[in-house]
Amino acid sequence: MSEYELREVEGTIHFDGPMATKGFKFNKMCYSFNSEENRQAFRDDPEGYMETFQISEEQRQAVRDKDIIRMLELGGSIYYMAKFAIIFGWNMQIVGGMQSGRSTEEFKAYLDSQGRGKNNG
């Protein structure tokens, strides 16, 4: 395998050209969250905000469900999921737990067991 060949990694969602196309409107909406004014507009009227960007019903439901994994499956870029973490008031341990199939407490314990918890720098 050359260094440029893609390797499948179990449990990951590969973000490639077709996924970028699938998630274009969704990611455009997420990009708008760089502005606090837009984050507040979303908090005030999430349905109206999603309509403005004309994201798919499946993507809207993933947002309503606060389902980060489903958002990724529907073309969301991992870089923009941090924007939802801010909007939803989540920290990275919450998101890490979701991504790894663990509760937040289980994920924190895992990080601690690997020497990566808050007490280990």
Image: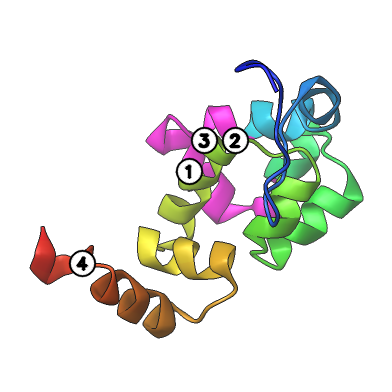
Q: Residue furthest right?
A: 57
- State whether the magenta stretch is mostly helix, strand or loop: helix
Q: Residues within 10 Å of mark 3 (few under 14, many from 20)?
A: few
Residue at 68%, 42% in the rendered image? 49
Q: Is residue 2 above or below residue 12?
A: above
Inter-mark Cα distance, 3 to 1: 8 Å
Circle 3 SS class = helix
Q: Is residue 117 above or below residue 84?
A: below
Q: Residues within 10 Å of mark 2 (few under 14, many from 20)?
A: many
Q: Are marks 2 and 1 in contact (CB under 8 Å)?
A: yes
Q: Is residue 79 above or below residue 69?
A: above
Q: Which residue is mark 2?
A: 30
Q: Which mark is residue 17?
A: none
Q: Is residue 116 visible?
A: yes
Residue 42, magenta (yes or no):
yes
Q: Amino acid at mark 3?
A: Tyr
Q: Residues within 10 Å of mark 1 (few under 14, many from 20)?
A: some
Inter-mark Cα distance, 3 to 4: 25 Å
Instruction: State which region is magenta.
Output: 30-48
Inter-mark Cα distance, 1 to 4: 27 Å
Residue at 10%, 57% in the rendered image? 121
Q: Nearer the viewer, residue 5 or 118?
A: 5
* Image x and y of residue 22, in percent: 85, 31
Q: Amino acid at mark 1?
A: Lys
Q: Quadrant of residue 70?
A: bottom right
Residue at 43%, 35% in the rendered image? 37
| Camera-side mark, 3 or 1 | 3
Q: Quadrant of residue 89?
A: bottom left
Inter-mark Cα distance, 2 to 3: 9 Å
Q: Which mark is residue 115?
A: 4
Q: Which residue is mark 1?
A: 83
Q: Which mark is residue 79?
A: 3
